[in-house]
Image: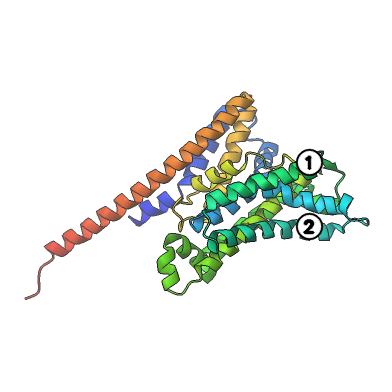
Amino acid sequence: MRLQLVVLDNLIWLILILFFLVNVFFTPNFLSYGNIVNIFYHSTILSMLVLAQGLVLLTGNIDLSIESTLAFAPAIAMLLSTKWLPGGLNPYLAILVTLTVGGLVGLFNGVSVTKLGINSFIHTLSILIILRGLTLFFVPFAIYKLSGTYTFLGRARAFADIPVAVIFTLFVFFTLHIVLKNTPFGRYVLATGGNPRASYISGIDTDKMVIVIFLFAGALAAVAGMLAAGRQDAVNNTMGKDMVLLSFAGAILGGTTLSGGRGTALGMLGGALLLGMISNSLTLIGINVFLLYATYGILIFFAVLLDRFKVKLRELLFHRENMRTLRELETAPRGK
């Protein structure tokens, strides 16, 4: 049973390997070094959103505002740097402002959900619309010629022509994996999503856990905005548009459950890479852009279906194990 549960929890990597092998044989130029690097590079922005969404899902909530935060946070920083402040803004302060704006949006979401009791779906949907509207108002045209310091994370290349964004993204995911698996904070987060009432009774400040995770999700969305701005060397009002549902699909494909309390950062990484690989392979074979958009919808449906399948299969495995244990107790010789 333990092996079956391990396979179930790491199913995304089996799917990823299988899809990779299929593309090696049937997709032209897929296995080239440049294309592999390209898959990782173009998955970095979505990866940050998948991680943000996955962390919120772990607490049993959902955050639809991250795609708008992705555009709003760097937009505010760049407006302060180019228009709103006479002397502009130091590039390092611009980075700090970006992260602060993202964190404040997340903080507001967390407080509204926990202290005001607003449903996370409805609340973050309203914030998504508000922030996108504000971004459209403040940035009717793209802001170009950004500072090299600000765009470094999204544009710079390291050894072997590997983008710095890829190295940074992998570092963030592995760090979060360790935090969730091996620290009390990580266990508290999983417990909060798994059983909020029992966690609260046991002494965990569940409201605090939810607020911190929402704050961190907002900061991750802001980082995704910096990566997007660095990649295109500009900030525009359409950055991140329609990515929130893909972030949701990536997290679910990676093993994060809709009910909360179960999931890993590495699983979320696998989900993001699968989405990036699917997009890359469909582009290489020249699929119509509208069919590509429809494919994303199919992936979201498949992600939800996979989540239900895994939940049912896990319940079945535990039921069989309990029945086996019960039979062993019934057939065991009784002491005289």
| Kind of residue at disc 1 | Gln
How crowded is the residue under tag 1: few (<14 C-alpha within 10 Å), some, or many (20+)?
Answer: some
The secondary structure type at the circle numbered 1 is helix
Query: CA–CA distance between discs 1 and 2?
Result: 17 Å
Q: Which residue is mark 1?
A: 232
Q: Which residue is mark 2?
A: 95
Query: In this orientation, which residue lies closer to the viewer: 277 or 103?
Result: 103
Give the mark nearest the N terminus, 1 or 2: 2
22 horizontally vs 233: left or right = left
| Kind of residue at disc 2 | Ile
Nearer the camera: disc 1 or disc 2: 2
Q: Which label number is shown at residue 192? A: none
Q: Is residue 309 visible?
A: yes
Query: In this orientation, which residue lies closer to the viewer: 184 or 333?
Result: 184
Q: Residue at x 62, y 23 (%)?
A: 288
Question: Could you tell me residue 318's position as x and y percent?
Answer: 30, 55
188 shown above or below 45:
below
| Quadrant of the image occupied by residue 107 | bottom right
Q: Is residue 216 visible?
A: no
